[in-house]
Amino acid sequence: MQQNRRPRPSRRPAGATPARRALPGLAAGTLAAALLLTGCAGQERVCGSGRYPVKAVGNTDGQDCAADGQEPPQGYVRYPAGMVPEYVGDKWDRHWGTVVVDAEGRPVSPTPTP
């Protein structure tokens, strides 16, 4: 004897259409794409809001942040206009990591270390 089986109707919870289930993934993908396209993903600013970066005198790796409207602290100088690092690892951040400056902010030859 042959049995006739009827397909079971699918039981979806109210409001769980395929499009509605895909919305969270679509939203996350759109946000990730927007961050990548704007260049914001993974970039850390050298200084926070209301502060600007300053270069230490006499060494290659000294850097700090000073409050906007105030002079750099003792032992630090401002970066030249147009050559200020904005993000960690950007062109100017890498450049100034190889340069020693004097108290006037002029590049000097680094002293060889023994």
Image (cartoon, rainbow, N blue to C red):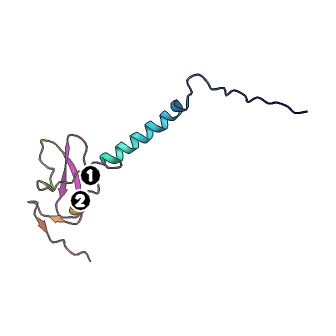
Furthest-right residue in this view: 1
Viewed as shown, does residue 28 lie left or right of 112? right
Residue 89 in the image: state x and y as whole percent. Answer: 29, 57
Q: Please report the bounds of the magenta region as a residue range.
A: 42-65
Classify residue 85 as left or right of residue 30.
left
Residue drawn at (22%, 75%), measured in percent from left and top? Answer: 112
Q: Amino acid at mark 1?
A: Tyr
Tell me the crowding category of disc 1: few under 14, some 14 to 19, or many 20 or more residues within 10 angstroms, Cα based.
Answer: some
Q: Residue furthest left?
A: 104
Q: What is the CA distance from the residue labelled 2 to the residue labelled 1?
A: 9 Å
- Looking at the rendering, in which quadrant would you find the C terminus? bottom left
Q: Residue at x 10, y 63 (%)?
A: 106
Percent coordinates x, y for residue 27 in the rendering: 43, 36
Q: Is residue 46 magenta?
A: yes
Instruction: Check disc 2 and give the amino acid type.
Output: Lys
Find numbered disc 1 in the image and state the secondary structure of the residue it sits on. Answer: loop
Farthest-out residue, front: 2
Q: Which residue position is annotated with label 1?
A: 87
Q: Which residue is mark 2?
A: 91
Q: Quadrant of the N terminus?
A: top right
Residue 40 visible here = no
Number of residue marks: 2
